[in-house]
Image: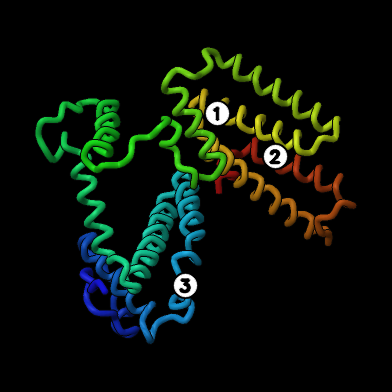
Amino acid sequence: MHEPTIGDTPLEPVEAMQYIGIDMNTPKEAFSHLYEIMQTLRGPNGCPWDREQTPKSIRSNLIEEAYECVEAVTSDDIPHIREELGDVYLVTTFMAYMYEQEGKFTLAEVLQELCEKLIRRHPHVFGTGSEADTAEKVVAQWKDIKVTVEGKKPKDSILDEVSHALPPLDRAYKLQKKAAKVGFDWERIEDVWAKVKEEIQEAEASWQEGNKEKLEEEVGDLLFSLVNVARFLGIDPSVALSRTITKFNRRFKEMERRLKTQGLLPSSEQFHLMDRLWNEIKTEEAANPSSSQK
């Protein structure tokens, strides 16, 4: 089994409490302390919940924390960004330490491999002989190094460079970007909008036919075409959808609050009232945009 090579021995709970409120002077000190805390939490006298977790049980947490971090960056809320970046570090460190405990690899090895890869793929910074002096040349060099130096199998298609593990919305966006880079793209935004209208008509026709399987396919085509509109206009569809979800969540909760002041709960019987309250909230937010960002 690999021996831990980051940080010292696990902290006793009393020792750990002494660090609360004390500034760490360097990233090295702060990360070492995080590692020590993780050792303690996963140790014999640690937290029952933390000890029961496995990489698979917390894999969804990694996705959740990443999206929460993206949301914080989008809102430009600096304290929130700092907190959410910390949560991302927490989950990745937590997961890596689990594998270290199993003897698969150490957290130090994870970081060492990352450092070596960054240096190897940036010869224009850390080496000599590279003429990559533009962002485009750097990307091309990066791809070449992965094949010629690291021995990775060349992709049969440029689309193979897009991970299958991505959520469908993100994968659609990246696939379209890859295709557009080699010229497979619309020339005018008007044509992209026309495609959306065409897909709406086809989806509606499938609905009228009562063909559920065909309708599912056409709805997928419609969503794909809307992603294309966003891409063509320079908008990340995932970020745009995240903003809309946040907005819906905020307005719905405010609508619930106003219903409660009248002794009511959301229900189909209250639809017309809920619709009126919803429109009132929208109008108020439009009149005072800064309040809707809280």
Element under disc 2: helix
Q: What is the x, y in percent for residue 9?
A: 24, 79
Q: Closer to the observer: label 1 or label 3? A: 3
Residue 144, image quadrant: top left
Residue density around tag 1, few if under 14, some if 14–19, many if 20 or more, within 10 Å: some
Q: Which mark is residue 230?
A: 1
Name the residue nearer the viewer: 227 or 158.
Answer: 158
Q: Amino acid at mark 1?
A: Ala
At 40% across and 32% down in the image, what residue appears?
156
> Circle 3 is placed at which residue position?
53
Q: What is the x, y in percent for residue 171?
A: 51, 38
Element under disc 1: helix
Mark found first going from the N terminus, 1 or 3: 3
At 54% across and 45% down in the image, what residue appears?
167
> Circle 2 is placed at which residue position?
282
Residue 190, image quadrant: top right
Question: For this view, does 195 lie left or right of residue 90?
Answer: right
Name the residue nearer the viewer: 75 or 238.
Answer: 238
Marks 1,3: beta carbons within 8 A? no
